[in-house]
Image (tube, rainbow, N blue to C red):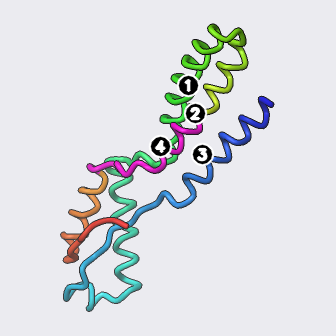
C-alpha cells in the first residue's frame, strides 16, 4: 500500500513537469524577418542561457517539489488528526501525506508564476538584439 502511494505521487510529479519549459514569443519585426528562423532561435537560446547564468532560474520541477513537500506535511498533519479521532493515526497520516504531496506537486507544476527577474533579463537581452518580446509560451 505504501509503495503504491509513493509510486503514484512520484509519477504525478514527473508527469506534471514534462512540459515545463517556456520560451519567449517575439513579434515578427524587421530584425526578426532579416535574421531568419535559425538566427532567431540561436539568439533566444543565447539570451536564455545568459539569463540563467546571470540571475538563475527556479524551474517548475523545483517549485513542484517544494509544493509537494509542503502539501505532504500539511496532509500528514491533517491525516494524523483525523486518525487520532477515528483510531488509526498511522494509516490516516500516511494517506493524508500522500494525498497532500500529490496535490501540492500538481499545484506547484500548474502554477504559472515563473521567475520574473529571469524573464525580464531574457526580454531585455532580446530587445538589445533588436527583437520585440511579446510574452512567453
Crowding at dot 2, Cα within 10 Å, few <14 / some 14-19 / many 20+, comes out as many
Quarter-of-image position of residue 78: top right
Q: Nearer the viewer, residue 83 or 135?
A: 83
Q: Where is residue 113 drawn, in percent x and y?
A: 34, 48
Q: Where is residue 103 drawn, in percent x and y?
A: 54, 38
Q: Marks 4 and 3: in contact by CB < 8 Å?
A: no
Residue 133 forms part of the magenta stretch: no
Q: Where is residue 59 drawn, in percent x and y?
A: 45, 48
> Residue tagged by mark 3?
13
**In this rendering, is residue 1 above or below 17?**
above
- Mark 3, secondary structure of its residue: helix
Earlier sequence position, callout 3 versus callout 4: 3
Earlier sequence position, callout 1 versus callout 2: 1
Earlier sequence position, callout 3 versus callout 2: 3
Residue for point 34% across, 59% down? 50
- Where's the C terminus, which quadrant? bottom left
In three-dimensional space, the C-alpha distance between marks 3 and 4, rounded to whole angstroms, equals: 10 Å
- Where's the N terminus, which quadrant? top right
> Residue tagged by mark 1?
75
> Residue tagged by mark 2?
101
Q: Nearer the viewer, residue 14 or 116?
A: 14
- Mark 2, secondary structure of its residue: helix
User: Dominant secondary structure of the magenta stretch?
Assistant: helix
> Residue tagged by mark 4?
107
Earlier sequence position, callout 4 versus callout 1: 1
Crowding at dot 3, Cα within 10 Å, few <14 / some 14-19 / many 20+, comes out as many
In three-dimensional space, the C-alpha distance between marks 1 and 3, rounded to whole angstroms, equals: 16 Å
Please provide the residue range marked out in magenta.
101-117
**In this rendering, is residue 44 above or below 89?**
below
Amino acid at each position: 500500500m505504501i509503495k503504491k502511494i509513493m509510486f503514484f505521487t512520484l509519477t504525478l510529479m514527473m508527469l506534471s513537469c514534462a512540459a515545463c519549459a517556456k520560451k519567449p514569443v517575439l513579434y515578427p519585426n524587421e530584425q526578426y524577418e532579416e535574421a531568419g528562423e535559425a538566427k532567431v532561435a540561436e539568439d533566444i537560446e543565447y539570451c536564455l542561457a545568459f539569463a540563467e547564468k546571470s540571475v538563475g532560474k527556479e524551474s517548475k520541477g523545483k517549485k513542484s517539489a517544494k509544493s509537494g513537500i509542503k502539501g505532504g506535511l500539511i496532509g500528514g498533519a491533517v491525516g494524523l488528526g483525523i486518525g487520532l479521532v477515528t483510531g488509526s493515526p498511522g494509516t490516516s497520516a500516511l494517506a493524508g501525506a500522500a494525498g497532500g504531496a500529490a496535490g501540492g506537486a500538481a499545484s506547484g507544476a500548474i502554477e504559472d508564476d515563473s521567475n520574473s527577474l529571469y524573464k525580464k533579463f531574457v526580454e531585455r537581452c532580446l530587445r538589445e538584439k533588436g527583437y520585440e518580446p511579446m510574452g512567453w509560451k
